Image (spheres, rainbow, N blue to C red):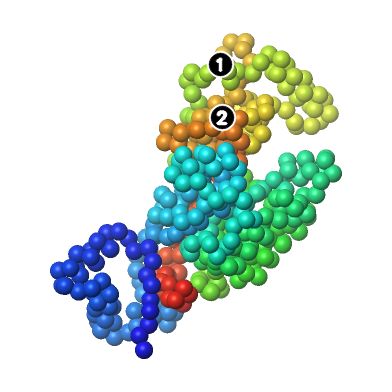
């Protein structure tokens, strides 16, 4: 009895070769592909996909063609990185209308909206699920704010914290082989570790092997920005012994703030004398109490504090000193883009300054994502090489 096998995501150059060859041999596409498989079988005297019984040495490519979805997409930091490594985005979701505007301008498509209104079965099949799921309920700033307002936080926060479980529902139904998630450093320590325990336990119950590590983007961009990067592999696809390592910091010259600064920024980014006086008095009051709160003026030869989504309010965490007796200035939106590793010449800012500050403050650093994703692809390639498996779909089910 013949079997039906559907092959997805054939590279365009291979598809063109198949079309040319079948025409020369006056065969249908199916006849030509079957003939190739029969010749491969006859030449090896073994099944084409050998499973784990035999180890075959093969080169491990740096990039693999793969399909991914971009959830809680923001302005597309994940997408920029993954597309550089051969990924093709087949679905995106982001509820903020201003972020949708930027995403649409950069990628030519408007993401689907609220993830709570998305039917998981409507999402296309994919190899990797990327998601920078909302961090505020788990962040130090977010927890402090909600406590001061008497509001719940973490998984008790119905509007944001529970969005993780919508993500888990999509994972359960779609079963992507790889998950690539990002969140704030504080995720692991929030609520005495219970929040992270629930997240990790949920992913493990879904039969994924979970890896997590906090990386500081200061090795890639001139900004101290610690985030947790969570990478998960489906055990049914990769087995229980899947190995994964996070990237080492890049070699070379350390990033410098001076390298991303504009030579002649608009004067509108200079603080008013009133605001500058207020910030100095505020810092002095906290200094007298032994607190570390206050504005920050970084060394141009060094790095900055973490750029936050609230930078639009006063910019106090990162102020740039100016010559003469002028008050310092904020970073411009274009400088914020470069501080996060985005190229504002290629990815034009299409929203107001306020929204741009929010978007870059909430974004992932594409350079960090790219290096972590490169290690993901190495791990996938190594595992596939050891097993001699192939990512095919058979009647909608992955062949193991």
29 and 256: which is toward the camera: 29
102 and 372: which is toward the camera: 102
Q: Which mark is residue 352?
A: 2
Q: Quadrant of residue 200?
A: bottom right
Of the residues under marks 1 and 2, which one precedes in the sequence?
1
**Residue at the image position 58 percent from the left and 20 percent from the top:** 269
Q: Can the viewer see residue 40?
A: no
What x and y, as percent, mark residue 66? 42, 60
**Residue at the image position 73 percent from the left and 22 percent from the top:** 279
- Looking at the image, the residue that sits furthest to the bottom is 1
Please rate how many residues cluster around mark 2, counting C-alpha atoms within 10 Å: few if below 14, some from 14 to 19, many from 20. Answer: few
What x and y, as percent, mark residue 126? 48, 62
320 and 110: which is toward the camera: 110
290 and 114: which is toward the camera: 114
Q: Which residue is mark 1?
A: 267
What x and y, as percent, mark residue 128? 50, 60
Q: Can the viewer see residue 131?
A: yes
**Residue at the image position 48 percent from the left and 42 percent from the top:** 104
């Amino acid at each position: 009895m013949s079997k039906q096998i559907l092959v997805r995501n054939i590279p365009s150059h291979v598809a063109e070769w198949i079309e040319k060859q079948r025409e020369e041999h006056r065969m249908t596409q199916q006849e030509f592909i079957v003939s190739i498989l029969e010749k491969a079988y006859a030449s090896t005297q073994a099944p084409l996909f050998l499973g784990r019984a035999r180890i075959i040495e093969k080169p491990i490519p740096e990039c693999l063609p793969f399909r991914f979805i971009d959830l809680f997409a923001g302005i597309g930091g994940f997408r920029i990185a993954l597309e550089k490594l051969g990924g093709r985005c087949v679905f995106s979701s982001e509820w903020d209308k201003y972020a949708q505007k930027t995403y649409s301008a950069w990628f030519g498509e408007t993401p689907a909206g609220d993830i709570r209104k998305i039917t998981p079965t409507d999402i296309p099949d994919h190899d990797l699920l990327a998601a920078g799921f909302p961090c505020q309920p788990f962040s130090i700033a977010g927890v402090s704010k909600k406590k001061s307002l008497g509001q719940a936080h973490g998984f008790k926060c119905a509007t944001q914290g529970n969005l993780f479980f919508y993500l888990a529902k999509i994972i359960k139904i779609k079963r992507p082989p790889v998950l690539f998630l990002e969140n704030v450093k504080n995720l692991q320590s929030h609520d005495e570790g219970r929040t992270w325990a629930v997240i990790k336990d949920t992913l493990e119950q879904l039969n994924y092997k979970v890896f997590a590590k906090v990386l500081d983007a200061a090795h890639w961009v001139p900004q101290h920005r610690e985030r947790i990067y969570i990478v998960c592999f489906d055990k049914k696809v990769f087995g229980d012994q899947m190995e994964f390592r996070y990237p080492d910091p890049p070699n070379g010259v350390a990033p410098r703030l001076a390298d991303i600064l504009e030579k002649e920024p608009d004067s509108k980014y200079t603080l008013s004398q009133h605001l500058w006086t207020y910030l100095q008095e505020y810092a002095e009051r906290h200094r007298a109490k032994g607190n570390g709160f206050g504005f920050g003026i970084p060394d141009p030869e060094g790095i900055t504090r973490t750029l936050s989504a609230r930078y639009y309010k006063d910019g106090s965490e990162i102020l740039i000193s100016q010559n003469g007796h002028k008050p310092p200035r904020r970073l411009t939106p274009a400088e914020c883009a470069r501080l996060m590793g985005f190229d504002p010449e290629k990815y034009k800012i299409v929203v107001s300054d306020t929204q741009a500050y929010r978007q870059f403050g909430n974004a992932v650093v594409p350079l960090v994502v790219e290096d972590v994703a490169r290690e993901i692809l190495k791990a996938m390639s190594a595992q596939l090489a050891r097993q001699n498996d192939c990512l095919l779909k058979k009647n909608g089910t992955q062949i193991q």
